[in-house]
Image (cartoon, helix red, strand yellow):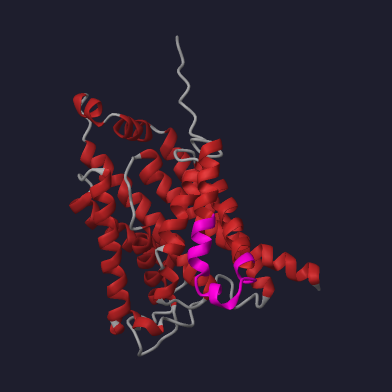
Amino acid sequence: MELTGLFFYVVSLLIAGGIYAILCLALNIQWGMGGLFNAGIAGFFAVGAYSSAIVTAASTHKHLGGFELPIPFGLAAAAMIAGLAGWAVARICVRLKSDYLAMASIGIAEILRLVIVNEDWLTNGSLGISRIPRPFGDLVQGRAGDFVFLCVVWSIVAIVYVIAQRLYQSPWGRVLRAIRDNEHSAKAVGKDVEKFRQQTFIIGAAIMGVAGALSAHYFKFLSPTATEPLLVTFLVWVMLMAGGSGNNRGAILGAIVIWFIWSATEILTSSLPPEWITRSSYIRMLLVGLLLQFVLQRFRAGLLPEKPPKIHYD
């Protein structure tokens, strides 16, 4: 029984790690490839989560939706609506420099969070949305359902990874990295810098929406606490920096390693005295921050740094 419990605990860690891997791949497209500092990851994650929940949840009078559509429609809706939100943000903010873009994206994410909390007709407010279905939930129940969901999540991780790799190796990706490294030179050779950045931001936002949708289907319940910036924005940035910005494999590795460490710190802080347990989230942030400092001291570009492109001479 202990081995079975440990196995399914690891399964739950890998499910969450897979969802974070999708977020890291999305952020790697925006930051690692395009140099766009998105500090509003939680906002696009939330848009995707609520979009899929509304589209696929059972009928109810408590909030908008209850359309009971198949889960693939929910994932598609999450990507489209989060991408549309990314387009709106990009139209306003993408021409800003990195520090101003970070502040603007934080503000927009907070606006989205307040909409989720206060618009009861849309999201049921702080009470959240329940009865969100899981893939193959009618066929597989209990712990076996977790294993099936693990396969679904990592299948989507593989698809997103292939897309991200194709983008990185394509002429579009090479232009994007040229803009990241030297914007003025890219402009000098006639590249539409703003257009490329908009495209990058939209693609990343859409993938973040898919990650949010998977999170909603995993827990089968969604409330504003599931989209806290600490658990989404902060951790994802730590994962990408530790894994290796600009490297898609590094993004996945960073997500798995940091999530396992974050889960281990939860076990560690649960043994603290009662007066410290209430501060456990801040202690865990401190521990993860110290770990990131250690990793970056030893591996300046992350565990799997971006490899410079090979130059072929004729």
Instruction: Reply yes or no: does residue 282 show up in magenta.
Output: yes
The stretch of residues the image draws in magenta is 268-287
In the displayed structure, does residue 285 sit left or right of residue 37? right
Between residue 309 and residue 73, name the one nearer to us: 309
Instruction: Reply yes or no: does residue 158 show up in magenta.
Output: no
Q: Quadrant of residue 83?
A: bottom left
Between residue 40 and residue 191, name the one nearer to us: 40
> Which quarter shows the C terminus?
top left
Q: Is residue 156 visible?
A: no
Instruction: Name the residue located 41 percent from the left edge and 86 percent from the top edge.
Output: 59
Q: Position of residue 281 (x, y in %)?
A: 50, 67
Q: Position of residue 303 (x, y in %)?
A: 56, 39
Instruction: Name the residue located 48 percent from the left edge and 33 percent from the top edge.
Output: 306
Majority secondary structure in the magenta region: helix
In the displayed structure, does residue 280 sit left or right of residue 120? right
Q: Position of residue 162 (x, y in %)?
A: 50, 44
Count the labels in the image.
Answer: 0
Q: Position of residue 172 (x, y in %)?
A: 34, 35
**Is residue 210 depicted above or below 136 in this figure?**
above
**Is residue 269 depicted above or below 248 in this figure?**
below
In the displayed structure, does residue 220 sit left or right of residue 121? right
**Is residue 59 depicted above or below 28 in this figure?**
below
